[in-house]
Image (cartoon, grey):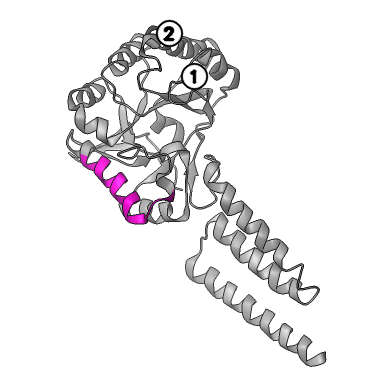
Amino acid sequence: MAYRKKEIKEFRATVVRAVKRSAATYWPLSIGELTGCGAFLAAVLLVGVDPRLAAIPLLVFILLCAVAPFIPAWSFFLPVISRGASRRKAVAITFDDGPDPLTTPELLLLLKKHRVKGTLFVNGRRAARYPELMAEILTQGHTLANHSFNHDTLGGFKRTKTMAHEIEATQAALRAVGVMALAYRPPMGITDPRLGRLMKAKGMYVVNFSCRGWDGGNRWIKNLSRRILKRVRADDIVLLHDIVPTPPSLLPYWVNEIDGIIKGIQDKGMEILPLADIIGRPVMMDLGGEDWQTPAKLCPGP
């Protein structure tokens, strides 16, 4: 028994040294990596008490890894921007899945009417199909960002090579209209550890959201404005969609709801600012070399 206790003690010491070396080499670690190290260390320490208890921290870690991809605001695997840091009574509005020949022109008219600048996280396939809409978005002073090429809802679980292609193909569609996206929003806001490595390799970062109306990609738009206005708070990043409603006959209703959201936010005494001003970093870059919508003072990157 004494020999076994000595062996366990030596093993614990070895694990602690290994964790310290890892932290010194790779710091800063993600929340997920730190949690994993902590779970493993806890399991090692519990072995000496009761081997059955050692499984508990490991099972908790596995559960967290299974849930974390589906929490868009959680920086578990990589840094995720989901709220602003302006400390102003202001929000940013973002639109996913466009451009769309039916909704984008209507959306641009609304934004112009209210003198608001938005950010459109575009679908790469649509961006390549409608370059004239992309050009008009830029002409009116809005920003473009990357939302994958095919918007595969399970894209976060595909091979790393497939994920990289989805991002790069959309970057190519954006380069065709003269800009490079710095911000990326994964389909459904789903993240995983590989996405962090891809973002670092491409010089990009992830932006998700903090306020949404659960519209199902404009499939459930009834009372959308009421749902958004009930939730919206200062420094929120609001998620909406720039895609034809289901059924398309609801397009006038959708236009009215978006109009109501913009007006309602302003009636609450909040400004609607460009995303770059809310988060404190550029969202896209002109390939001529100048940042678009870059605040005077950039906050440190995530």
State how many labels appear: 2
> Quick one: label 2 or label 1, which is nearer the N terminus?
1
Magenta stretch: give its range: 157-172
Q: Residues within 10 Å of mark 1 (few under 14, many from 20)?
A: some
Where is 258 relative to 236, above or below? above
> What's the amino acid at mark 2?
Tyr
Q: Secondary structure at mark 1?
A: loop
Tell whether position 165 is magenta. Answer: yes
Quarter of the image with the N terminus is: bottom right
In the image, residue 177 lies at what x, y percent?
18, 33
Is residue 280 at least partly visible in the picture?
Answer: no
What residue sits right under mark 1 in the picture? 220
Instruction: Tell me: residue 76, above or below residue 187.
Output: below
Q: Compared with residue 130, is residue 251 higher up or lower down, i.e. above or below?
A: above
- Residue 140 on the magenta span: no
Q: Of discs 2 and 1, which sits in the foreground?
A: 1
- At label 1, the amino acid type is Trp
